[in-house]
Image: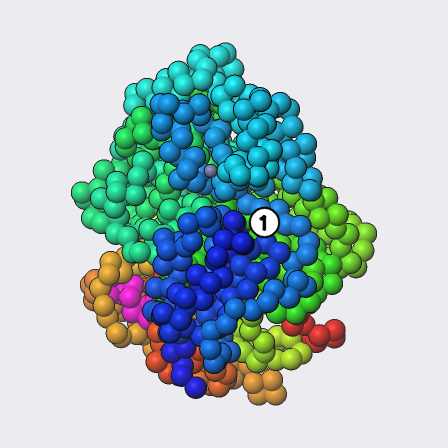
Amino acid sequence: MDSTIKRMRVTIRGAVQGVGFRPFIYRLAKEMGLKGWVKNNSHGVIIEAEASEDILRGFLLRINPEKPRHAFIQSMEHSYLEPEYFHEFTIQKSDGSDGKTAIVLPDIAICSDCLKEILDPGNRRYQYPFTNCTNCGPRYTIITSLPYDRPNTTMMQFQMCDDCLAEYNNPEDRRFHAQPNACPKCGPQIELWDDKGNILAKHHDALLMTADAIRNEKIAAIKGMGGFHLVVDARNNSATLRLRKLKRREEKPLALMYPSLEMAQRDCLLSELEKRLLCSPESPIVLLRRNNHETDNISDLVAPKNPYLGVMLPYLPLHYILMAELGFPIVATSGNISEEPICIDEHEALSRLGEIADMFLVHNRPIVRPVDDSIVCIMAGREMVMRRSRGYAPLPIQIKHRIPKTLAVGGHLKNTVAVGFDNQVFVSQHIGDLETLQTYDIFQKTIDSINNLYEFKPEVMISDMHPGYISTKYAEKRDGKLNKIQHHHAHIYSCMAENELTPPALGVAWDGTGYGGDGTIWGGEFFKVDGKGLARIAYFRQFHLPGGEKAIKEPRRTAIGMLYEIYGNNLFKRDDILSLKSFSQAELDSLRVMSEKNINSPLTSSAGRIFDAVASLTGIRQETCFEGQAAMELEFAIGGIAVKDHYPFESKISSPAKNIYIIDWQPMIVAIINEINNNIDIRTISVKFHNTMAEIITYIAQVIGEKRVVLSGGCFQNRYLTEKTIERLRADGFQPYWHQRIPPNDGGISLGQAAALLYKKEGAE
Ligand code: ZN
Ligand code: ZN
Ligand code: FE
C-alpha cells in the first residue's frame, strides 16, 4: 500500500446541484489523476478523492475558481482521512438516506455579486449595509426556528417592498427565496449613537462619522452579524492601548480586519491555502506569520511578542463600505469585557460596553445568538480550526457510525455544546469560559435553542467528570440518563471521531488541566485505545502545584513544584534559579511551608504545566495574563532556528501488572538548568525542550507499538510541537492524527463526549 496516498473528503454546500457540478468535479478529478467519487446529498455535494496530499491540496484550490458558471459555494469543509484505496473516479447516485434532517446553515460572507451592487452608484442597493442574496448573508444568527422562512427569522419585522418582493418571488432571480432580502427602502438601517444612546447620525452619514472617529483615535463599537466588534485604528498605539485597558485585555493578541487581501499581504506571509481561507465564505480569522515584525504597519500592542497576526477580511457589506472609507487595518475584537460573552444587543451594549466605546454604530436587525469570529490556522499543511464559530457553526461533523440522540455539554473553558444523532454531531458555536453568569446564561440558551431548532429530545446526556464544572452540574440537574466522560478521554475521542478512526490507536492527550479519574489533575496522558475503551498506559511523573489554581496563572509556581521534587528543601538555598528570584522572601517562605507540608498543592501530570515551568525557568514568563501565554512565548522563543538535539528523559514501569509507564522529566529539567547556567541561548533551550517533548511521544509510541497515534489537547495548538511530533512519528513509521475541523483545545470536548458513544463499551474503564 502506498503510504503517501491520503483520502480527502470535501463537503460543499450552496447552489451546487443542477448546475453541472458533479461532471465538473469528475473531469477535474480525472485530469488530476484522482480516485474516488462525487455525489449529491440533500444539502449539497460530497466528494471523496484519493491521491498524495500535494495533489489533493491542488485539487481543493482549483474547485472554487474553476467551478461551473451558475454554481455558488456557500461553505466548503474538507478533511484528510484514512485512504480506502479506490480504483477509479465515479459519479455516484445520491443514496438519499443521509442528512434528511433540515440543517441550519452558518452565516456567510457577502458574495461577489452583492459586493458589485453595493459599489455601483447606479444600483438601488448602492452602499446599503444589509445587502444579501440566496448565496450570502446571515443565517444562524437570525433564525429563531425551523423551517428557515422569513417569519422564523428576525427579518420578520421588516415588510419587503414591491421591488424586493418581486425578486423574492422570481425563480430566475438571485434573491429567489432569500429570507433576509432587504433594500434601503424596506430593510434594516444603521445609526450612530453616542455612549448615552443619543442618535448622532443615520444611514451613510453614520458610517462616515464612524470612520472619522476611528481615524481620530476613537474606540467604536460596531454591531455586526454575530455581535459587536470593538474597533480602533490598528496602526495607532494610544488607541490600542486605551482599548486594552478599558476592555481589561492586557496582552492577549487582538484580531485585525484588513481592507483587502493585497494589504494583508504586505504585512504577512500568505500561502495559497491561507489566501483561500481568508477569501472563503466562512471568512475566519486566519493566523498568519508576519512578514517582518519591524516593517509592518501594525501597532506593537496588537500582538505583543507574537510572530503571528490574526487577520480577517471584511465579510459584511457594512465592513466593506467602512474599510473602503478607511483604507487601513483596524483592530476588530469581540465586543465584550475580558472573558464575557460577546454583546449582541445595542441597548445592552450601551450598559456593557459604555465604559469602553466612544460611540456605537448600531442597526435594527436583531441578532438571535452571539456568534464570534472563527479562528483557523494551517498546521502541518492542513487547516486546523482553533475556534469554530461564525461560518462553520452549527454545521455537523460526520461520524462513522450511528449514535443515539445525545446532548453533550462540553467542558468548562472554551465551552461548546453538541447534539448528536444518526451519524452526525452538531457542535455549537464557541460559547466561552463558563466563568461568568453571562456565559452560563448563553450556555443554557444555546442548549435550549439547539434542542428547539431540531425539536430534539436527548436520550443520553454526557458531561465531564469534574464535579465542580458548572456544565456537569447543569447536566446533573436535568432529567434523563447522564454519562460522565473523563476530560482527556473526550479529547482523544474527539480527534478520533473527526478523523473517523477505529481502534486500536495510541491516544496522546496533552493540555493544561483536567479532572483525572483518580482525584489528581491530569494533562500529560497516553491511552491505549482498543475495542473496549481507553486505558491510561503512560503519563508524566506527577508534581505538586503550590497554590493550586494560582499556579495556573503563575508558571513560576509550577517551576517550584517540579524543582521541589528534585531538590527538596535545598531548592530554596539556590541562587541560580530565575523562578525563585521573581518571588519576595515572604512568598518564598510560604512556598517552602506549602511544599514541605503539602498544603493546597494538588498533584498533576500535566504537560501544559511543564511548558509553563520551562517558560519560567528560562525567564520568559513568570506570571501570565491569559491561558497558554507562557507556552506560546516559549514556542515563539525558538525564533525559527533549526536544532536537532533534545534533552535526556527517563521512563520506568510503575506497575508491572498493568504496564504503566511513568515519564520522568527530571533529567530534562536538570539539563535545562545547567544550560541556563552555561549561558546557552534561549532559542536553543526552547527548541531542544520542544524536541524532547516530541521525542517522548515517539518513544512511548515505540514501546507501546501502536502504529496510529492520536494527538489532542490544548498543547497541540503549539505549531512547533505538533509539526515536530508529526515529523518524528512519521520518520519512525507511525501514522499521526491531529485535529482539522474541530479544535484540539477544550472547544473539542463536546464532540469527544458525544463520540465516546462510538468507542466506549459499557463497563469498560
Ligand atoms: Zn450575495
Ligand atoms: Zn426593499
Ligand atoms: Fe483540555
Confirm whether the magenta stretch covers residue 294: no
Residue 318 can be seen, yes or no: yes
Residue found at x 52% / y 15%: 197
Read off the residue under disc 1.
394
Mark 1 residue's CB less than 8 Å from ligand 1: no
Nearer to me, 249 or 584: 249
Against 719, residue 286 (above or below) is: above
Quadrant of the drawing holding the N terminus: bottom left
Residue 345 can be seen, yes or no: no
Residue found at x 59% / y 62%: 398
Residue 630 screen position, x and y as percent: 38, 53
Residue found at x 67% / y 78%: 532
Against 204, residue 143 (above or below) is: below
From the image, give the main secondary structure of the stretch colored magenta: helix
Residue 524 screen position, x and y as percent: 50, 68
Q: Which residues are magenta?
A: 682-695
Determine the residue located farthest toward the left in the rendered image: 295
Confirm whether the magenta stretch covers residue 685: yes
Nearer to me, 132 or 254: 132
Residue 612 screen position, x and y as percent: 40, 58
Q: Is residue 291 left or right of residue 577?
A: left
